[in-house]
Image (tube, grey):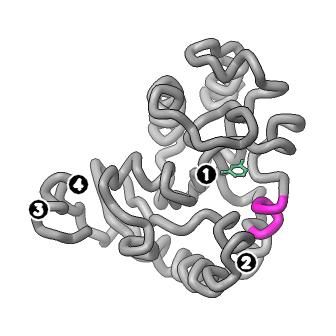
Amino acid sequence: MSELEALAAEVAQCTRCLLHQGRTKTVPGEGPDNADIMFIGEAPGFHEDQQGHPFVGAAGKFLEKLLESIGLTRADVFIANVIKCRPPGNRDPLPEEIEACKPFLDRQIELLQPKLVVTLGRFSMARAFPKARISRIHGQPRKIGGVLYYPMYHPAAALHQPSLRSTIEQDMHRIPELIEQAAQIAESPLPAEAEQLSLF
Ligand code: URA
């Protein structure tokens, strides 16, 4: 069993927050353990909770199309979420749920050491850019603490707001070039410093 698989087994036993009471399955995330790119979404929805796999509903179908547009499939990338259990009624994750699940996500990034971490949506973005607005920073890569983050809108945003679709597609199209340049992209100031410099 790989260390990522061992971590997934640990997630399956987790009772760190109340979400364990209502879950059908945990959704730890999945992908090759040598993936260059890691996508981090928000939280499992209905279908993910039923199946135990991330992004298998409508947003997942769009994510697959986006991947296809840059010559990738979901089998090429690691896909995870900020929290590993479905919030009731698909409500936003609570701060205590995000905090309880953080060690799992931290460890996944540490084990995977991806060249690029693509955050999907504001909850995922907030782990690297706590005070940023997604409308201002999407599509702008920044290296923080040795990890190259690339904030994007959540694919579900395009389902609710079709005008965002082309923005998401354009941001996705930059990914191959970012992977090429990953080693050259310089470390950014810490988020607090960046904020003072009004980068966000
Ligand atoms: N939305 C997410 O953020 N994650 C999923 O796994 C599915 C939908």
Residue at image location 77% in from the left, 22% down from the top = 22
Q: Position of residue 92 (x, y in %)?
A: 59, 43
Magenta segment includes 61: yes
Q: Residue type at mark 1: give it.
A: Gly
Tag 2 residue: 71
Depth check, mark 2 against mark 1: the one in front is 1
Asked which secondary structure carries label 1, the reply is strand
Q: Marks 2 and 3: which is nearer the front?
A: 3
Asked which secondary structure carries label 3, the reply is helix
C-alpha gap between disc 4 and disc 3: 9 Å
Q: Quadrant of the C terminus?
A: bottom left
Q: Which residue is mark 4?
A: 191
Q: Residue 179: horizontal and vertical position, in percent?
A: 49, 71
Q: Nearer the viewer, mark 4 or mark 3?
A: 3
Given residues 144 and 183, the one toward you in this image is 144
Residue lying at 46% horizontally and 65% vertically, measured from the top left? 151
Report which quarter residue 39 is drawn in: bottom right
- Residue located beneath label 3 in the image: 196
Q: Amino acid at mark 2?
A: Gly
